[in-house]
Image (spheres, grey):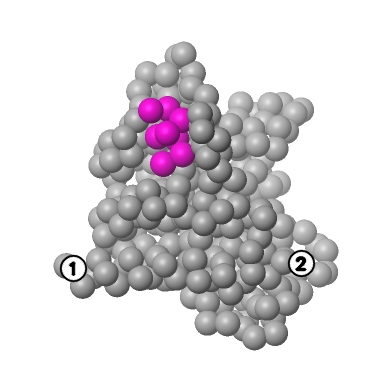
Amino acid sequence: MKHNNIPNLGIGIGLRIDHYDDIFSTYPAIDWFEIISENFMTDAKLPNYHLDLILERYPVVQHGVSLAIGSPDPLDFAYLTKLKALARRTKTPWLSDHLSWGRLPGANYHDLLPLPYTQEVITYVAERARIVQDFLEIPFALENLSSYVAYKQDQMPEWEFYTQVVEKADIFMMLDVNNIYVSSRNHHFTPRDYYENIPLDRVIQIHLAGHTDKGTHLLDTHDNFVCDEVWKIYAEVYPKTRGVATLLEWDDNLISFADTWKEALKAKAFQQTLVEAI
């Protein structure tokens, strides 16, 4: 499955409550917004009111944080039914979640935990991801994690694991280039080894974000400007995707809406430079 029929929405930012006053008072010329699906899988009136205002004027793409595709408990079809209903309401052209686990039967860790990179896990996760995409009836993508630990039983590098999961499931990649950089520093590999060994024609969307440098390791905090090294990765990856929607994530220590959008627009400047170079 390729992304030939999936639109490039341009540059977007995450929809955050702190920015509502600026958004709803001026309705700025943003290409699109990404929403956290779980924030709107509710009957509460206020979130739905604000979402309707956004949907009147902007394309919206859903991004989830609690599917926990690699967890050992059965797929939660009550959750998936609510997710599908929201997808029909938003008309999201695709939706994504994370290549992670975070639950055990009876326990939810509310975290995006890395999986062991083994053939057994590939088979398990790919089948679940295939079922999810078939159930939702729209393109489904899994995002690469930033990680801080590795498993002794790993049989391959992350990029090979990621590739095999999406190809076996016939789904898409939601590629976070900041996560590539964070993990490369934490696990001592070269970012190019990662993005040159994944099927970039399966990338449906790119995430950009900032992180926190602790010296001995990096933390994916989404609370800072995108660093030069991550922009360099983006500049190399973006043209190889043949152009996909790009999103700036900023989730903590929020700055003004105007400054957030200014940071996101750096991606457009990179894209224009790359087009001119071609």
Q: Distance of mark 2 from mark 1, alpha carbons? A: 43 Å
Q: Indicate the quadrant where residue 272 lies.
A: bottom left
Considering only vertical position in the picture, is 115 above or below 232? above
* Location of residue 79 with respect to 35 vertically, above or below: above
Instruction: Say which mark, if any, is on residue 64.
Output: none
Check disc 1: other Cα within 10 Å, few if <14, some if 14-19, many if 20+.
few
Q: Is residue 203 visible?
A: no
Residue 47 badge: 2
Q: Nearer the viewer, residue 135 or 171?
A: 171
Residue 211: where, in percent of width, then height?
Answer: 53, 46
Corner quadrant of residue 23: bottom right
Residue lying furthest front in this view?
215
The one nearer the camera, 236 or 39, is 236
Front residue of this view, candidates 71 and 263: 263
Looking at the rendered structure, the kind of residue marked 2 is: Pro
Q: Amino acid at mark 1?
A: Ala
Residue 155 appears in the rendering: yes
Left or right: 253 as drawn, with respect to 264 = right
**Mark 1: which secondary structure?**
helix
Residue that badge 1 annotates: 277
Residue at the image position 49 percent from the left and 66 percent from the top: 263
Magenta extent: 180-188
24 is within the stretch colored magenta: no
Residue 181 falls within the magenta-colored stretch: yes
